[in-house]
Image: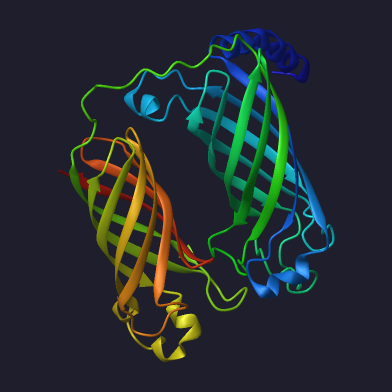
Amino acid sequence: MCRRERWWALVAVLPLLLQVAVAQSWSVGLRGHYGFLWPHRPSSWVLVEGHAVATELFAERRLPGDRPWQRHYRAPSFGVGLLYTGLANPGRIGATARVLPYLQLPFVRGRHGDLGMRLGWGLGYVTHPYDRRGNFKQIAIGSRLNTAIQLMVAYNHWFGRTGLSAGFGIDHWSNGSFALPNLGLNLLSASLGVVRSLGPVTPYVHVPDTAALERPRREQSVVGAMFWSETGRPESGRHSVYSLIGQVQWRLSRKSAVAVGADVFNKGALRTDHPELEDRGRAALTQAGLHAGYALLFGRGELFLQMGAYVYTPVPDEASVFHRLGGRYRIARHLVAHLALKSHYAVADHWEFGIGYRWS
């Protein structure tokens, strides 16, 4: 297909896409952010050179509320946001961008407005990462491609098909210690936005959900996960890391659950900072821990935050406690997909990509 034919095909498809967007009550918007690079570690102050401006283009739609979890959250919105910023440091950081899907979860919703939290997780890009020769003072990010996370409290109000939005939040770029350095970049900002609905805006009317709960009160699971990480110094090499997670989860309400569990980690990167382990087998790199956590439930999916402590480690790690932020999705009756970032406080340790078995 030649270039002209591709353009004509795109022009032919656009009306259909627009019709679908209108039918599903999609909205498009533009948001301006004003803030600064937040140095959560003292060594990151070298990157702060002034206030930062960011521009975000987004599209979202209010979910129809035809599923129980959507009614539990009073019809949340799903969207995709594209953000661009220079972080006020073109020399050492360059341009920074991210694209991420997100959920807007209302805390309070009226007929024409809502106050809630936007939770997003996607991909980020940094044009000037750390380079040993040319950009050695860029001590925050060691790779161009990263993950991006957004947490933002926002108030939205509709005037017919036009809406105004005000928010305050944080955008975070990190590669999960896949490549050092990895202190991460944090944009702390206030924002104002305008949004236009492509179809009529229907005032929200809450219908209490009386259906039976979707999940059992208690659920057990065992998950195996792995990835690679770099520890110690930049360009020291990546090492595989394995996780085995056993957990019991209790549902507290239609939207939340708590959990306790045990963890076994086998981390090849322990040898980087501890040469005394170089002549020992892989089994000598095993750690054990216990964790507790809280989860927000979304039908077959969930977002969770956990905190744990090592009960055994062959050598001291970066901290005696660890944290895990991630999500799970129930892909079948007994199968669950797992994606999480394990960290020591604000310093990422490694990613976990895995699959597990669950039962109740």
Please determine whether, in this image, residue 171 is positioned above or below residue 102. Answer: below
Task: Indicate left or right for 54 with 246 as reference.
Answer: right
Please determine whether, in this image, residue 338 is positioned above or below residue 177. Answer: above
- Residue drawn 49% across the image and 31% down it: 108
The C terminus, quarter of image: top left
- Which residue occupies the extreme bottom position in the image? 276
Observer-nearest residue: 276 or 222? 222
Observer-nearest residue: 285 or 301? 301
Residue 95 percent across, percent down from the top left: 78, 51
Q: Quadrant of residue 91?
A: bottom right
Residue 25 percent across, percent down from the top left: 56, 14
Residue 217 percent across, percent down from the top left: 18, 41
Q: Quadrant of residue 49?
A: bottom right
The N terminus, quarter of image: top right
Q: Quadrant of residue 180?
A: bottom right
**Number of numbered discs present?**
0
